[in-house]
Image (cartoon, rainbow, N blue to C red):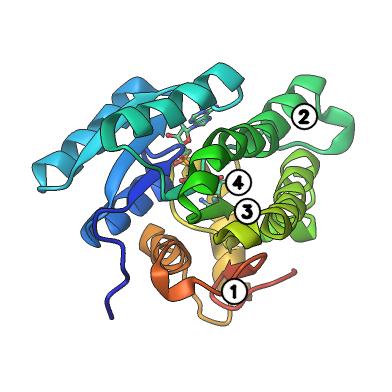
Amino acid sequence: MDMGLAGKVAIVTGGGRGIGAAICKALAAEGAHIVANDIDRARAEETGAELTAGGAKAIAVAGDITRAEDAEALAKAALDAFGRIDILVNNAGFTRDGRITKMTEDDWDSVVDVILKGTFLCTRAVIPAMTEQKSGRIVNIASRAHWGNPGQANYSAAKAGVVGFTRSQAAEHGRNNITVNAVAPGFVETPLVQALPHYEKIKQRTIDNTPIPRLGRVEDIADAVTFLASERASWITGELLHVTGGRYRG
Ligand SMILES: NC(=O)c1ccc[n+]([C@@H]2O[C@H](COP(=O)([O-])OP(=O)(O)OC[C@H]3O[C@@H](n4cnc5c(N)ncnc54)[C@H](O)[C@@H]3O)[C@@H](O)[C@H]2O)c1
């Protein structure tokens, strides 16, 4: 199937490793030009160099998506390099887990800022170009945690917020042929989850409670994002696609 992605310009936040890096690779494999963002410059540059070495057109843009000026600079870098912005994948995110009484304001603010405010700022930065083009694809990385995980009040609230934000933006921009969807991954083996304190326990619980009994692979998420970012998904908007091996709550 031709995904219609050749020559499209895609910004991926948090594209330096994990799911974001896999999304960059999957979109590049379909011929898209990639703008790989990460707060960690070395990681962004590693993804950019790997894509370029593989024959893709790619640039790396270091920046903190929680800062409005960095989000604007990211959009400008894409326009300066490639002249348009077709796809935005709001992927950057992290966890700072803890039961509510142990959760500090900083745990709350930092997680909500990167997941929710970062998604808002980057979306706001690309909408003018997409509106002028009368086309665009925005894919937000939510999480199965939007149902509400114990010990993740900050993360669950932010990811549920991303779902509401997605539907709001789908309603706002449909008339300009801009689709806005979200992907909710289950437990995917990446550096983020490998750093969790009870990683081995969570891993076993995931396998035991998942109808397709394995952890997610970064490619599972990247493939879903690629479809939603493609021309094949032109009448799908405001959707939340769970990529969880069939696991929902519990
Ligand atoms: N791994 C999972 O099991 C899982 C499950 C559900 C949802 N997710 C979501 O998928 C996304 C990617 O997660 P991952 O597991 O690949 O994590 P990861 O830690 O491997 O990669 C995230 C990247 O985002 C970057 N980043 C963090 N803050 C940033 C900021 N302010 N500005 C720019 N870049 C920033 C990090 O430097 C890192 O390179 C996140 O939104 C996460 O919440 C992951």
Q: Is residue 36 above or below residue 221?
A: above
Label 2 vs 4, first from the N-terminus: 2
Mark 4 within 8 Å of ligand 1, using the beta carbon: no
Would residue 88 be seen by someone viewing this image from the given angle? yes
Q: Specify few, some or many for label 2: CA neighbours under 10 Å numbering under 14, 14-19, or 20 or more.
A: many
Q: Specify few, some or many for label 1: CA neighbours under 10 Å numbering under 14, 14-19, or 20 or more.
A: few
> In this rendering, which labeled residue sits more in front, label 1 or label 3?
3
Label 1 vs 3, first from the N-terminus: 3
Label 1 vs 4, first from the N-terminus: 4
Task: Give amino acid for label 1.
Answer: Asp
Q: Tell me how far mark 3 sits from mark 2, CA to CA.
A: 17 Å
Residue 208, label in figure: 1
> In this rendering, which labeled residue sits more in front, label 1 or label 2?
2
Would residue 195 be seen by someone viewing this image from the given angle? no
Q: Is residue 148 above or below residue 81?
A: below
Q: Tell me how far mark 1 sits from mark 2, CA to CA.
A: 30 Å
Residue depicted at 60% across the width and 46% down the height: 198
Residue on which disc 4 sits: 198
Q: Tell me how far mark 2 sits from mark 4, CA to CA.
A: 20 Å
Residue on which disc 3 sits: 142
How far across and how far down the image is residue 95, in percent?
Answer: 63, 38
Q: Tell me how far mark 1 sits from mark 3, CA to CA.
A: 23 Å
> In this rendering, which labeled residue sits more in front, label 2 or label 4?
2
Q: Tell me how far mark 1 sits from mark 4, CA to CA.
A: 16 Å
Q: Would you identify the image quadrant in which residue 244 lies?
A: bottom right
Mark 3 within 8 Å of ligand 1, using the beta carbon: yes
Q: Are marks 3 and 4 in contact (CB under 8 Å)?
A: no
Q: What kind of element bears circle 1?
A: helix
Residue 108, label in figure: 2
